[in-house]
Amino acid sequence: MKETAAERLSQAITALLIRVHDYCEKIANSKIRHGLCLVNPKRAFLKVPDEIILGQLQNIAREHFTPLGATGFYFQYFTPPGLPEVAGKDIQTPATIEDYQLTFRLPEFDITAESEVRARALLYCANEQEMGAWDEWFSPQLEAIRLTPLFYKGLTDLHIIGQIRLQLAQPWANVFEFFVRDYIGKDQTLGIGQQERLLYKEGTEDWRPLFVEIEGLFPNDAAPLIEAYKVARKKAVDSRNPKIKDLLWGFIKYIEGTLIVQSQLSVDMKTDLLKELRSHANKKGKKGYQAKRPTLCLSDIECSQILYLTVQKFGASPKEHAILGEVILFIWICQHAAFSSLNLKVEDVLDLSVTDVDFENLTIHFTQGDSDISGGLTDILLAWIGTPDRQNKRRLFPNLTYDNLEKNLSRLCVNFLGIEGKLQPRDFLAKVHVIPGARISIEIRKQIDEQTELVKGSPYLVNIWQIKKHILDSYKQKKPLNSL
């Protein structure tokens, strides 16, 4: 009986998993161990160590790694962001070995290293000749993240947003009273003297008789501030009493100003939070509505885990779960396009035709540009498409629609990550990052990518090919342990 496309695809994916497994076994069983010497400057304006300092660094590294039985060692240069200028030293001051910090490691292929290799190998989808080639994808990212504080700014922003939400969940009464007393001290239309204003502001005079119209307006004193905000906003819109209207609008602006407008968030984030806050207040009887959340960027481990779970379910019964085969191809193509710097929509991927795949040049043609694909993914796509006698324009994903794509991904993610971890198809369009467990917003991902050009120009950029050359050279030396 003739094999179906799903069965051919399953066999090709199984071959990939076997290659990844064998590659990891080979590394684990290898007796070769390479030491890593991380070198970073202690002060600003330092260049890569010159030959004299480099020789001194080599001697120090050799003395450290020789007793540990390392076969060879190599250097990585890393510039931490925001290096301080040291008093009395500048770019004209010659560097000495004391200006460089050394960190020694003898990496082992442990469980963590193996999980990273498996994740990256699966995402890259390498053929036999490409095993290990995923370094070209992930190493530049690592350096970009190291050399920019953007991710840490993202964590700071999340902390600020968390504090805002916490404040909105606190009881409203004390916040409102503080606002009203300050408001009375500034409002010139209340018909009270300056001395009385001070008494109200200091809290020695009860303010409630001045605003008897709002008695019973707000919920009980223990209700959260967000509820008082909603009530104030609705009443401020509906009220025809200018005195109460001005008071309530002042309270609204006070909450928005102190919690959001005056925060250290970006203008865009402030705008989004204000929209969210006002939309909650403007809802009328709408239940279960949720605003569309922004696109997230997954870690390589997390993305690979979802991919692997899909592969496992698909491989158990390719004919029955043929649609999952298309979901797997969707994730692979999305990630290859992301690493080719293409900004795509889900529809751009789903609308691909067979003729958009250029097997000879290892590319996929999109309207937005060409995406490079690995030889392994090319082989898998060829297994899926088959070898028709003539080219045709049939769809690459004949059965995959947005609805069943979203349904299948959501079901897999909920089973693995729980309801709070549910992912959307668009989340797989963004280039994965290498910080385990973190979900970075698409804005932060874009900002990190924008740092790539700066990283490329850094004299401390880690060059994976240079590292491999260092290791190779260490074998060619006659001494028991050599570097560079």
Image (spheres, rainbow, N blue to C red):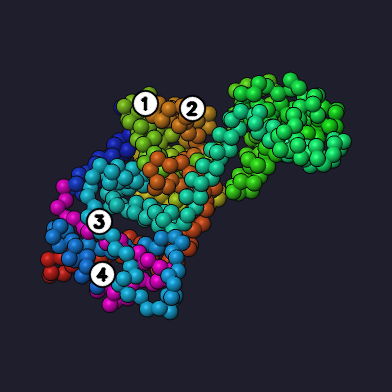
At mark 4, the secondary structure is helix
At mark 3, the secondary structure is strand
Q: Earlier in the sequence, mark 1 or mark 4?
A: 4
Mark nearest the camera among 1 and 3 is: 3
Q: Which amino acid lies under the numbered mark 3 shown in the image of this protein?
A: Arg
Q: What residue span does the magenta drawing correspond to?
A: 29-55
- Real-space Cα distance between discs 1 and 3? 48 Å
Q: Earlier in the sequence, mark 1 or mark 3?
A: 3
> Mark 1 and 4 residues: CB-CB less than 8 Å, in contact?
no
Q: Residue at x 50, y 36 (%)?
A: 425
The total number of labels drawn is: 4
Q: Which amino acid lies under the numbered mark 2 shown in the image of this protein?
A: Lys
Residue bearing mark 4: 57
The quarter holding residue 83 reads bottom left
Q: Earlier in the sequence, mark 4 or mark 3?
A: 4
> Mark 4 and 3 residues: CB-CB less than 8 Å, in contact?
no
Numbered tag placed on residue 407 in the rendering: 2
Numbered tag placed on residue 319 in the rendering: 1
Q: Residue at x 71, y 26 (%)?
A: 231
Residue bearing mark 3: 105
Q: Earlier in the sequence, mark 3 or mark 2?
A: 3
